[in-house]
Amino acid sequence: MPGSGLVNPTPNFQSRPTDVRALTDTKAGAVYSMIGFLLSVVGGYMFSYTGVLFGGYSCSGGTCSVPSVAAGLVAGLFVVVLVGLIFAILAVLKFRSAFQALVPVDYRFRSPASLSILVVIGAILLLLGLGLLLAGAVGVLGSCGSNYNYTNCYNQVTSSAGLWIGGIAAAGLGGLIAFIGEILVLIGIWRLGTRYNESMLKIGAIFVIIPFLDIVAPFLIYFGASQALKALDQTGGMVGAGMSPFSPPPPPPGAG
């Protein structure tokens, strides 16, 4: 209604192209999220395995010994985290594109479309923080490898402390900003579920920020968006809460 701020809060025939685009972008965002999750599993395994290797670190007779494979795993872990963050950013950008597409027809998506970019900013800061932490770790590995002097190892650890402090600060700030942006993504996906009367989208939105349950969130979002698109293809529209299905515009006056 005019002045309500909700230009067209339920789908109709005229908004169908916009709805198809929004749901298609939502599906793409869910796929990117699935890939990012897979990479996070690989990264978690590498992180735990690297920790086991560091457990073999030992000093004796003024020299320190660290398994040489640990340095390679640290570099590999950074690459996995980097690629995972790239896919996470792509997922958010796709969700944001879906929200932006709907803003002209549904004012409820304005805030998610504007503020979901915080996830990207937070991810960049998080990546910077991890880079600083891993740079410090690589420096320590280089100075504390097999048969290196204990004093040199100690000095390198001391000099790397600044990198680690900066890395922790950047990663913490990035994580906070990304969490706020993720809340806005959650709200946007929930409103997609409201607009299309699709419960799987709403459940997926809630699961986004719940540990362990966030594993299935991308799948629920993907199948929820697929169901909404299927309804568009099969019926030319769908039933919203308390609303009638989509219907084509009436013929002009005087038409046979």
Image (spheres, helix red, strand yellow):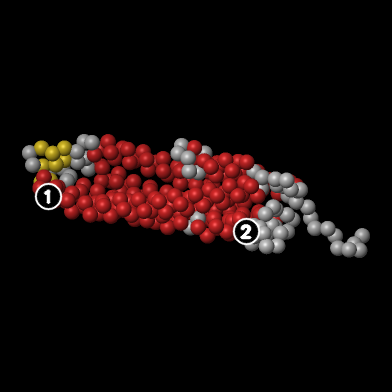
Front disc: 2 or 1: 2
Residue beneath the point at 24% across and 48% down: 137
Q: Amino acid at mark 1?
A: Asn
How far apart marks 2 and 1 lie (CA) works out to 61 Å
Q: Quadrant of the C terminus?
A: bottom right
Q: Residue 229, relative to residue 17: is it above or below?
A: above
Q: Quadrant of residue 250?
A: bottom right
Q: Residue lying furthest front in this view? A: 3
Pointer 2 and pointer 1: residues touching (CB < 8 Å)?
no
> Label 2: how many residues lie within 10 Å, few (<14), some (14-19) or many (20+)?
some
- Identify the residue at image location x=64%, y=47%: 194
The residue at the point 70 percent across, 47 percent down is 240
Quadrant where the N terminus sits is bottom right
Can you give x and y, in whole percent of width and height, for residue 106 in the image? Answer: 64, 57
Q: Which residue is mark 1?
A: 152
Residue 243 percent location from the top left of the image: 74, 48
Q: Is residue 33 left or right of residue 100?
A: left
Is residue 223 visible in the rendered image? The answer is no
